[in-house]
Image (tube, rainbow, N blue to C red):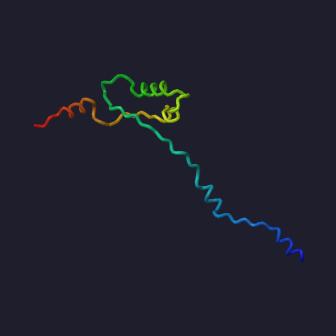
Amino acid sequence: MDARKKRNRNIIWFNPPFSVEVETNVGRRFPNRNIIWFNPPFSVEVETNVGRRFLNLVEKHFPKQHRYQKFLNKNSVKVSYSCLQSMEGIIKAHNFCPQ
């Protein structure tokens, strides 16, 4: 065997199935969080901070040792006042009797 054939036999070739540039340009993907929304109806007459009290109840009843703490904590439960009618409007609509 001549030196050229001996040298070519030991070469290892690698052909990647995709371009490395495409893979690096995809960017980081973050896992999708499951968020539970608490939407109490808005009322001007309520002076209590309903959102804070609700989140304090979540923290109180689902401590770190609780088996549902992974799903029900301050990071996975969000509070937003809904843009529904006021409680007075809901009650009037419920009690309305067309004649």
Find the residue positioned furthest to the bottom.
1
Q: Residue at x 54, y 45 (%)?
A: 31
Disc count in the image?
0
Quarter of the rendering containing residue 19 = bottom right
Quarter of the rendering containing residue 45 = top left
Q: Is residue 85 placed above or below 3 in the rendered structure?
A: above
Q: Residue at x 56, y 49 (%)?
A: 29
Of residues 1 and 93, the one drawn nearer to the viewer in this rendering: 1
Quarter of the rendering containing residue 53 = top left
Q: Residue at x 51, y 45 (%)?
A: 32
Of residues 21 and 15, the one drawn nearer to the viewer in this rendering: 15
Q: Residue at x 40, y 34 (%)?
A: 38
Quadrant of the snapshot with the C terminus:
top left
Q: Is residue 50 left or right of residue 17?
A: left
Residue 76, position as x, y percentages in the image: 48, 36
Of residues 32 and 65, the one drawn nearer to the viewer in this rendering: 65
Find the residue positioned furthest to the right.
2
Q: Is residue 52 left or right of residue 47?
A: right
Q: Is residue 26 placed above or below 7 in the rendered structure?
A: above
Residue 17, position as x, y percentages in the image: 65, 64
Find the residue positioned furthest to the left.
99
Quadrant of the snapshot with the N terminus:
bottom right
Residue 90, position as x, y percentages in the image: 25, 33
Q: Is residue 20 placed above or below 45 in the rendered structure?
A: below
Q: Is residue 9 left or right of residue 39?
A: right
Residue 96, position as x, y percentages in the image: 17, 34
Find the residue positioned furthest to the top.
47
Q: Is residue 45 left or right of residue 17?
A: left
Of residues 67 and 91, the one drawn nearer to the viewer in this rendering: 67
